[in-house]
Image (cartoon, grey):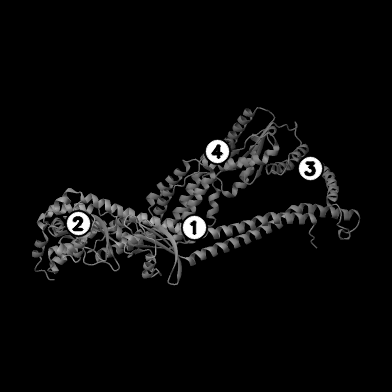
Amino acid sequence: MYRLNSYQAKLLLFSTCISTIPIVLLGFLLYFKSSQSIQDKVNEGNRHIVEQTRLRVEQVLHGVDLSLQRLVDNKEIMQSMTQNLTPADFQFEQEIASNLNQIQRFDFGLYDVALVGLQNGWILSNYGLQDVNAIKNRGWITQYVNISGNSYWAVEESSLARATTISNERFIHLVKKIPVISDRPLGLLIAEISTHELFRMLPQNNSLGEIFIFDLANGLLAKQNELSPYPVGELQTLIHGLDLESGAAGNVSAELGSHKVGVEYQKSAYNDWLYVSIIPYDQIRKEAWRTSWTTLLGCLGLLFVANFFSIQYSRRLYSPIQRLYEICFADIGRNSQETPRSLTREGDEFAVINRNITQLQDVQSRMTQQLNGQIRQLEELFVLKLVQGEFPLKEIKEKLSMMVYDPPLELEWMSVMALQIDSLKKTRYDEKDRELLQFAVNNMVSDIIPKKRCLLPTILQNHQIVIVHTDQPDLDEFRQFLTVTAERIERELHRYLGLSVSIGISRPYGQLAAAGPAFAEAKEALKHGLVSGNTPILYYDNLAQSNHQAILFPGETERSLLAAIQYAEREKIEPLVEQFFMEITKQGGNYIDFQASFLRLFADLIRLLHESDLQLQTVYGEEHMLFQQLFTFHKVDEIKDWFKTRMIEPMLPCFETRKQSGQRQLATDLIRMIETEYDTDLTLEQCSSRLHYHPNYVSRVLKQEAGMNFSDYLAHYRLLMAKRMLVETDAKIADIAEKLRYHNSQNFIRYFRKMEGITPGKYREQHANDPK
């Protein structure tokens, strides 16, 4: 029956206390710290989100304001204020329209820019030149003229010049009077921004709460979530109770319906808009509870692991004493002709152990005499244990005294050489021959290095190990001997066996007790063969003196490579692979960074397969152990060749098949979109966004499938529709031009004559008798 001894009990109690107490204290500290700070972190995060949203919106509004101010000072704009623009002033009108169009940049999100001539009652916008009295919302112009100030913001329910708008769409007007300093302005410059553009400026991945924007009349301009559970009316009531001085900001708690929420708000000093973020306290409490449970479970897990290892470690610490005691106790029983169970276990354990160790020493002396005939095996075992660091200095000297050296071994310096066989590819050998080759290499090394200059060469962990030593105090001479010997070994192995090998050499040490660390240094030097390229002899001295910076992962090149694989662009893959490895290797660095870069590329290739709904078995068949294969290479060229042939090449047929069917469907969807929406302001960017592809890729696919790019195809189809409308309808040419999204009929007439050789009117006359 197992009995817990007093020595073992002390070990167990000590290890349990030293592991349990810090974990318990750490758990309480983490719990209280996280509970106190989670609310502050949430509020701070909300405040940053609101501020970033306000700055993003105000940046766009400032840009619009500055662009309009430059237009106000434009000479042509000022000149137009006193003219009565008519269709006859086509060229001048186009120059003004060009100035207006120049500020309608994509990043501003301008819906329209209108110029109003108050003296002559005309308005020029994206919808052409119109009479002010002909537009639906002409009353706004009178209202804008009567408002004090030369520049101001207004929010309207519909567009100024366009007759119809999208449901739930409102418009923000920036109005500037012309000239700037005048009691009776000659005209107005009005920039129009859709509130849908404000929605696009709101953060779409905000997990902390919901963002709202209100105008100076507390009217809702934009909200992050169209399905928000918070009624607008209750939000407006809440806002009325806030301290909303210009530039004011703050945080309050409130109840919205059945929700208790935290409200973070900032009022813009630029245009008095209010930016509000709302987060429910239920979510904050949920995060607090999640943090508490995570901390508790983590501490319990750590306690379990710590106590488990405490018990195991205590048993392991005591197990040598227990085994020695049991062995010694059994010997006492045999010597006293009594069974072990009949003897008492009380007494001095270490006295029993000491007595038996003395007996073991006598046995060891007898065994040494028996092993004199097996000195080679003993020396090999000695070298193996020596490089594994299993001998203290005193025991090394005792073991050496058992060896037969003639003359006796005298050591001033020693170093460890670790040799490994590089790839067997492009040689006459197979992997099954590796063990036999290691034996042959070991024998050749034994013949090359004089026996008086090394211990017996041996094999450990796929490395051929040689402990080289000298009895001369000159360290430079010993280093030169190491270099000459390593070069000869590498040359002879290549000459007689046709093998490419790498040799790692440790630093010189003054005693054999350092063989363990020296072997570790030699292996470390071998690992850096991945960094050094084709250098076969690697010195730990050079590695220790180098100061490598961390490798920067070539993420842009990798993204281009993954895209080329996904789109099966074979001509791009080879150069991108070469560029990827060149960008890594030219930085230097250490082998750990190299391996990390290659592992990241491997993981991203596997992720690409998963994201493309491709199974590993479909791509690579029954081949397994891909991940383990990556660690078997010693040179960058081997790894690069493996990625090309074993990882990337099998993926390409699957992506090529998918690319062919996907491109045809993409072109079909784009053509259908053009043919159904040709009479709208359709752009390549809009179509690409709706199809979830990059515009360049969409244009390239359409060019490949239809023989023309997006703009040409759209213009071609609009021309086809124009000819049909000219023949089949009695619509005016100006109406046809407007339907086909031409800003004026003259542009349409010029394009039609360029493509068909005749004007639209002439075309209609020639086909007047065609059946409709």
Label 1 or label 2, whichever comes before in sequence order: 1
Give amino acid for label 2: Leu
Could you say which disc has been placed on residue 536 in the image?
A: 4
Label 4 or label 2, whichever comes before in sequence order: 2
Q: Residue furthest right?
A: 336
CA separation in Å, label 1 and label 4: 55 Å
Q: Quadrant of residue 193?
A: bottom left
Residue 358 versus residue 131 in the image, above or below: above
Position of 548 with respect to 558 (left or right) is: right
Foreground label between 2 and 3: 2
Could you say which disc has been placed on residue 371 in the image?
A: 3
Give amino acid for label 1: Lys
Residue that numbered label 2 is attached to: 188
Mark 4: few, some, or many residues within 10 Å (few <14, many ≥20)? some
Position of 686 with respect to 530 (left or right) is: left
CA separation in Å, label 3 and label 1: 72 Å
CA separation in Å, label 2 and label 3: 110 Å
Mark 2: few, some, or many residues within 10 Å (few <14, many ≥20)? many
Quadrant in which the N terminus appears:
bottom right
Mark 1 element type = helix
CA separation in Å, label 3 and label 4: 39 Å
Could you say which disc has been placed on residue 303 in the image?
A: none
CA separation in Å, label 1 and label 2: 47 Å
Label 1 or label 4, whichever comes before in sequence order: 1
In the foreground, 195 or 710: 195
Residue 217 versus residue 102 in the image, above or below: below
CB-based contact (under 8 Å), mark 2 and mark 3: no
Foreground label between 4 and 2: 2
In the foreground, 275 or 556: 275
